[in-house]
Image (spheres, helix red, strand yellow):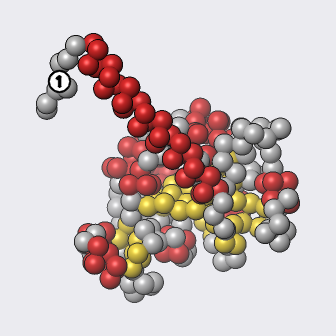
Amino acid sequence: MSLPQVVARDKWLAARRALLAEEKELTRRRDALNAERRRLPMVEITKPYTLAGPDGELGLVDVFEGRSQLIVGHFMFDPSWEDGCPSCSAGADEVSDGLREHLHARDTTLAYVSRAPLEKLERYKAKKGWTFPWYSSYGSDFNYDFHVTMDESIAPLEYNYKTLAEHEQAGTAYYFDGEQPIEEPGTSVFLRVGDRVFHTYSTFGRGAEQLGSSYHLLDLTALGRQEDWEEPKGRADAAHAARPDFAG
C-alpha cells in the first residue's frame, strides 16, 4: 500500500484548501440531490403483503410501528441458506439501538426484511446479537415486487431500474450471474398517511451499501431530516395535508 507524499506545511495547506473547496461543492450538490429526492412522487401500495414476525403475521403498515416513515433494508437471505449474506451482515452489525432511537425521534422506523423463513432469521439474529426488527417475506411477492429477488419464472428480470437487456448493453449483467432465484441488496423507503402506505424511494447496488448515520438514512426519506419543523416529530399527515398534489 502506497503512502501519501511527504511535503512542507505550506504545500499541504494549499492542497488541503483546494480539497476543501471540492468538499464544499460536494456538500452543496448532496443537499440539492437530497431535496430532489424529497420531491419525488410516490406510489400507493395496494397489494396486501403478509410478513412474518416474532408476534405472528402482519401487514406492511404494521411494520411502521405507528410511525410515519419506514426504511426497509432488503437483507440477502435465501430460504435455502443457513446464514445470511456476509456483506449484509457487516452492515447490520452497525445498526445500534442508538441509531434507531435517533430515527424514532424523527418518526421513522428501520427494519430488515428477508425471504428466508422466520425461524432462520431469528436463529441468525440471536447468533449475531442484533436487536433491530427483522421480518420474513417467505411465501409473499414482496422481494420480487421490489426487485431484490430475481427469478424470471415469476417476474421479468430487473435490477437497479434496468432490465437484463439494458444491463447487458451497459456491461453490468453480472447482477444476474448464478442460478435463480438470485438475491441482491437494496433499501426501500415508505411513507404512511393514516392506513395508506406509499412507496417513495428505493436504492440498489452500491447505493444500498451507503447507509451510515441516522441523518444519512433520513436523507433517503420523503420528509428528510425535518430540522426546519416547529415540532421535531412532525406527522406525515400534517406535512402532506398542505401539499396540493396529495389527494388525502
Q: Quadrant of the C terminus?
A: bottom right
Q: Quadrant of residue 201?
A: bottom right
Q: Secondary structure at mark 1?
A: loop
* Left or right: residue 207 compared with residue 188: left
Task: Please tell me which residue is depicted at 53% across the width and 37% down the height of the picture.
Answer: 213
Instruction: Compare residues 114 and 188 and report the one nearer the observer.
Output: 188
Is residue 233 left or right of 163 when viewed as pictured? Answer: right
150 or 20, nearer to the observer? 20
Horizontal placement of 70 versus 95: left or right? right
Instruction: Give the image location of residue 222, x and y in percent.
Output: 67, 55
Q: Is residue 59 visible?
A: no
- Residue 41, image x, y percentages: 66, 67
210, above or below 115, in the image:
above
Q: Position of residue 234 (x, y in %)?
A: 80, 45
The residue labelled by disc 1 is 5
The amino acid on which the numbered mark 1 sits, given as a three-letter code, is: Gln
